[in-house]
Image (tube, rainbow, N blue to C red):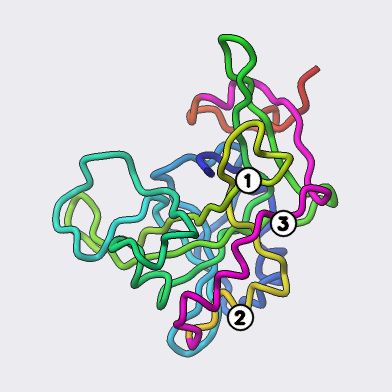
Amino acid sequence: MCGRFTLQIPLSTLIEIFGISEFPSFALEPRYNIAPTQQIPIVRQYADYTDHLDLLHWGFIPSWQKESPSGPPLINARSESVAEKPAFRQAIRYRRCLVPSSGFYEWQREGDKKVPQYIRLKDGSPMVFAGVWEESKGPDGKPQDTCAILTTASNDLVSPLHDRMPVILHPSEYPHWLDRDQRDPEKLNRLYQPYPTDLMEMYAVSPLINSPKNDSPDLVVPQD
C-alpha cells in the first residue's frame, strides 16, 4: 500500500517535468511525512487538454456519497479492481492524475516492533504514482476535490514488508495516464506492473516518522 510519502522536489522542477504552463497559486514546501487526509500536489489534465498542478485532499470521496465518510479514508485503490469498484470506476475512466513524490515509507517487522523503511529511486529522480481524483464534498458540504493512489503487487524489494506497493509510472507513461481521450480501463492495465526492483533502494529511518506531527529532514536520514 502507500500510507506515507515525501516530496522534496522544488515547484519549479515539477513545472518543468510535467510541462505545466500555468504557474500554481500555492507555495510548495519540502515535505518529509505526508499523511492521509492532508493536501497533496497532483497533476491532472483539464478539459482544454492542458496539464495543471493542483492541491487535493488525500482520501478519495465518491461523488455520490452524501454523508461524511465514517470509516478510514480511501487513500489507495487496487489497480486490479479499480475499474469495477463503484467508488472508482468513473474516476479511472475520466479523472486520472499523477502524484509526484520523492519516495514512500513502509514498515518492517522485527520481533515485537516495526522499523520504518524509506523507499526511493536509486538515481534520485522523482517517484510518480498513478492516481485518481473526484469532485467531492467535504464534511462542511463545500466542494472538495479528493484523490487516491493506485497500488499493485509488490516487487522483490518491498514484498518482505508488504504485499502491496504504489503504481509507479515511468516518465514515458505520464501522457498516456493523463490522456482525457483514453477512457478504456483495459488499455491501462499494462501500466500496473511492479516497478523494477533494481531501480529502487530502501533503508531504515527514524521511528519519529510514526507520528504525522513530525515533518523534518531528519526523517529521511539513514539509521545505523
Residue 26 at x, y percent in the picture: 51, 60
**Which amino acid lies under the numbered mark 2 shown in the image of this protein?**
Ser
Query: Which residue is tagged 2?
Result: 21
Q: In the rendered view, would you say 53 is above or below 201?
A: below
State yes or no: discs 1 and 3 in contact (Cβ < 8 Å): no
Residue 81 at x, y percent in the picture: 42, 60
Compared across the picture, whether 135 is left or right of 186 comes to left
Q: Tell me which residue sits at (58%, 27%) in the image.
A: 209
Q: Tell me which residue sits at (70%, 27%) in the image.
A: 218
Nearer-N-terminus badge (2/1):
2
Nearer-N-terminus badge (1/3):
3
| Residue placed most toward the observer, 72 or 55 | 72
Is 98 one of the magenta-colored residues? Answer: no
- Identify the secondary structure beneath mark 2: loop
Q: CA distance from mark 2 to mark 1?
A: 35 Å
Q: In the rendered view, would you say 102 is above or below 62?
A: above
Q: Count of labels shown?
A: 3
**Which amino acid lies under the numbered mark 3 shown in the image of this protein?**
Pro
Q: Which quadrant of the view contains residue 204?
A: top right
Q: CA distance from mark 2 to mark 3?
A: 19 Å
Compared across the picture, whether 36 is left or right of 209 comes to left
Residues rendered magenta in the picture: 181-210
Residue 143 at x, y percent in the picture: 25, 64
Task: Mark 2 vs mark 1: give the one in front.
Answer: 1
Query: Which residue is tagged 3?
Result: 126
Q: Which quadrant of the view contains residue 109?
A: top right
Task: Mark 1 vs mark 3: give the one in front.
Answer: 1
